[in-house]
Image (cartoon, rainbow, N blue to C red):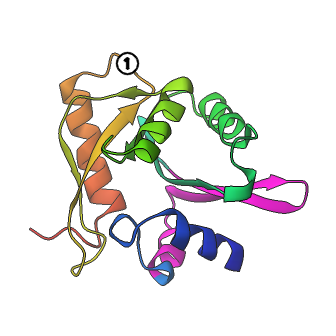
């Protein structure tokens, strides 16, 4: 679990992740799955998926820095799309720097489409801000009502501990 913790803490800025102890609790939720990505017996990365009735939400996805560019991420996304025959939604940073633009291009090359809806990721805790992000989806024909429903489910199920009304 230490390798996952180190990758999680370095791959995502504090505003875009839970405290690690909270993450460990969250993965016991029936709809949440932490999947290890292995190369042989070595941990190459992980992906946290939320499998809901109508769609899958990819919450966090990270590959060890030294293993990036080897096709591991691409094959992982291909496996996810084949395993779940439904819409997949993910959040990504705004395309305001080269690294963010490369990440978005990676997802586009792997069948994801940018959604035009403005979106703020709810705060992961009371001492963290909401974060403006972009949503991407494998469903290019996703209509506004579906997207509204998906966002409601994500806010309620994924961020429910942290959303205050």
Span of residues in magenta: 22-49
Above or below: residue 56 compared with residue 115? below
Q: Picture coordinates of residue 37 (x, y %)?
A: 73, 53
Asked if one can make out residue 142 in the rendered structure from this viewpoint, the answer is: yes
In this rendering, position of residue 36 left or right of residue 22: right
In this rendering, position of residue 37 left or right of residue 48: right
Q: Quadrant of residue 69?
A: top right
Q: Picture coordinates of residue 85 (x, y %)?
A: 56, 27
Q: Is residue 33 magenta?
A: yes
Q: Is residue 83 magenta?
A: no
Above or below: residue 108 compared with residue 14? above
Viewer-proximal residue among 93 and 120: 93
Placement of the N terminus among the 4 image quadrants? bottom right
Q: State the residue position of label 1.
A: 140
Viewer-proximal residue among 15 and 163: 15
Q: Quadrant of residue 6?
A: bottom right
Q: Quadrant of residue 84?
A: top right
Q: Residue at x 41, y 67 (%)?
A: 13
- How many tags in the picture? 1
Q: Picture coordinates of residue 82 (x, y %)?
A: 65, 28
In this rendering, position of residue 32 left or right of residue 44: left
Viewer-proximal residue among 148 and 40: 40
Q: Picture coordinates of residue 90 (x, y %)?
A: 41, 42
Above or below: residue 131 compared with residue 119? below
């Amino acid at each position: 679990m230490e390798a996952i913790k180190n990758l999680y803490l370095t791959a995502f800025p504090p505003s875009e992740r839970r405290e690690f102890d909270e993450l460990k609790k969250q993965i016991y939720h029936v709809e949440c799955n932490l999947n290890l990505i292995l190369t042989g017996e070595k941990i190459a990365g992980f992906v946290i998926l939320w499998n809901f009735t109508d769609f899958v939400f990819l919450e966090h996805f990270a590959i060890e820095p030294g293993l990036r560019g080897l096709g591991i991420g691409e094959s992982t996304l291909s496996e996810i799309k084949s395993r779940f025959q439904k819409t997949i939604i993910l959040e990504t940073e705004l395309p305001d720097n080269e690294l963010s633009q490369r990440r978005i291009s990676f997802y586009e090359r792997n069948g994801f489409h940018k959604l035009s809806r403005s979106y703020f990721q709810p705060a992961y805790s009371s001492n963290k801000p909401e974060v403006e992000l972009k949503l991407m989806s494998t469903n290019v024909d996703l209509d506004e009502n579906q997207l509204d429903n998906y966002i409601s489910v994500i806010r309620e199920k994924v961020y429910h501990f942290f959303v205050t009304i």
